[in-house]
Image (spheres, rainbow, N blue to C red):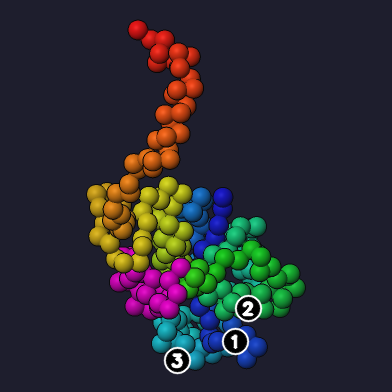
Amino acid sequence: MREIVLDTETTGMDPQDGHRIIEIGCVELVNHLPSGNVLQLYINPEREIPPEATAVHGITDEFVRGKPVFSQVYGEFMEFIKDAKLVIHNAEFDMKFINWELRQVGHEPVPWNRVCDTLAMARKKFPGSPANLDALCRRFGIDNTERTYHGALLDSELLAEVYLELLGGRQHGLSLSTQNGSGDAQGQNGAQKIARAKREPRPHAPSQAEEEAHAALLEKLGEKALWAKRG
């Protein structure tokens, strides 16, 4: 199964306000594991990058001035993703930019049914907890110390690890751990100890009516009983 973990960096929040994509980062997964194939595209947005955007991702006007425009690289992007499922954190943001850019070059948009939003996955799995990428890296013990700026390829690489953990870890299909919400200590091999309420032994002695019914049955069987024939 082939999936593409994807992230973008942009000049702002909304393409309808004239903002554009300036970086696309993609990481290929095969059966939920990174294959080693990645794609990183820097794009000239044909407009100035606001200082507040540069403060987030570190990409400057000077850096992208000589880069290709989207119409020159979208073919490479589409060839890389092909028909794979796209795994994106806060997918609504990235998809509105990607599909806006695709429409500008006459390409059909990517349908939403090809997209898996890890933000929605995290909010469902950990309701009420922070669900941004940094918070999820901390939760799963993923090293994100190199993330001094948001970068599309770096964030895709981190998200690939987060996605795997959201699915249940490297052996999510064979998971033996169960968390009961009480913070039970882990047992050997990392498996969770399951706390169970202690139950008092239940009485199993037969009632008087049951004993009388049993005696009547034995009398009825008489010599036909198997135990009466042994000897």
C-alpha separation, residue under disc 3 versus residue under disc 2: 20 Å
Q: Are marks 1 and 2 in contact (CB under 8 Å)?
A: yes
Q: Residue at x 61, y 57 (%)?
A: 84
The stretch in magenta equals 125-153
Q: Are marks 3 and 2 in contact (CB under 8 Å)?
A: no
Per the image, the residue denoted by label 1 is: 14
Q: Left or right: where does residue 48 sit relative to residue 201? A: right
Image quadrant in which the C terminus is located = top left
The answer for how far apart the CA atoms under marks 3 and 1 are is 14 Å
Above/below status of 106 relative to 169: below
Q: Which mark is residue 87?
A: none
- The mark lying in front, picked from 3 and 1, is 1
Q: Splitting the image into 4 quarters, where does residue 59 fall?
A: bottom left
Report if residue 150 lies within the magenta region: yes
Q: Nearer the viewer, residue 141 or 227?
A: 227
Mark 2 lies on a secondary structure that is: helix
Magenta stretch: helix, strand or loop mostly: loop
**Residue type beneath disc 1:** Asp
State the residue position of label 3.
Answer: 52
59 is higher (above) or lower (below) than 162? below
Which residue position holds label 2? 96
Q: Residue at x 57, y 79 (%)?
A: 93
State the image coordinates of residue 74 (x, y, percent, origin top left): 64, 68
Number of dots carrying numbers: 3
